[in-house]
Image (cartoon, grey):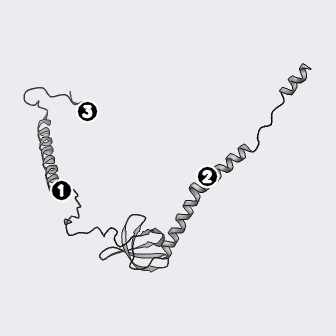
């Protein structure tokens, strides 16, 4: 009788065979709702935007260039990115249509002749320039001492890159 109890206790217990399948299904559903479905929604939205493009609309390209559509020819668009500058791009390169209160062309009367867009106040710019002049003056003084002679009042530290004896 003792051997029968032992044999009954060692019988393999049947585990749930649906657990691994259930885990795979749950992961598949999660991937679909978290990755694939939003991508499909974005693709549909982009197709709708591209199908509704008309001359005169302000747009932003996938490269970040803002411009105005001046012509539509099948899958290509003529885009004016600056006054008198037109480029031909593919329709699918349009990221979105910019509302009228969006960013302007980037030109303003305050731009310098070199096209610089400094966003710092004049006082800060003057301080930066003064500091740069100070550094360049100290660099010139260091270059004058580079002739191998020790500066006044002491010995010059040896440069580890210097191969001369």
Circle on res. 161: 3
Rendered-image quadrant of the N terminus: top right
In the displayed structure, 13 sits above or below 4; it is below
Report the residue at 15% width, 56% height from top.
122
Report the residue at 48% width, 72% height from top.
49
In the displayed structure, 42 sits above or below 13; it is below
Distance from Cα at disc 3 to Cα at disc 1: 42 Å
Report the residue at 48% width, 76% height from top.
52
- Residue 14 location in percent, x, y? 80, 37
Circle on res. 133: none
Distance from Cα at disc 1 to Cα at disc 2: 51 Å
User: Circle 1 sits in a helix, a strand or a loop, which is it?
Assistant: loop
Circle on res. 30: 2
Q: How many marks?
A: 3
Residue occupied by mark 1: 121
Point out the tag, 3 or 2, that comes first from the N-terminus: 2
Question: Between residues 75 and 68, which one lies in front from this camera angle?
Answer: 68
Q: Residues within 10 Å of mark 3 (few under 14, many from 20)?
A: few
């Amino acid at each position: 009788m003792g051997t029968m109890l032992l044999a009954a206790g060692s019988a393999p217990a049947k585990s749930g065979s649906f657990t691994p399948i259930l885990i795979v299904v749950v992961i598949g559903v999660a991937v679909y709702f978290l990755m694939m479905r939003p991508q499909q929604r974005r693709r549909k939205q982009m197709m709708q935007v591209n199908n509704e493009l008309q001359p005169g609309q302000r747009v932003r390209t996938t490269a970040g260039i803002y411009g105005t559509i001046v012509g539509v020819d099948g899958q290509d668009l003529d885009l004016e990115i600056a006054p008198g500058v037109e480029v031909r791009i593919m329709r699918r390169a349009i990221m979105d249509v910019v509302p009228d209160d969006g960013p302007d062309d980037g030109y303003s009367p305050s731009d310098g002749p070199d096209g610089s867009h400094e966003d710092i106040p004049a006082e800060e710019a003057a301080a930066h320039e003064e500091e740069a002049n100070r550094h360049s003056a100290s660099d010139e003084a260091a270059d004058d001492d580079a002739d191998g002679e020790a500066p006044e009042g002491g010995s010059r530290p040896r440069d580890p890159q210097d191969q001369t004896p």
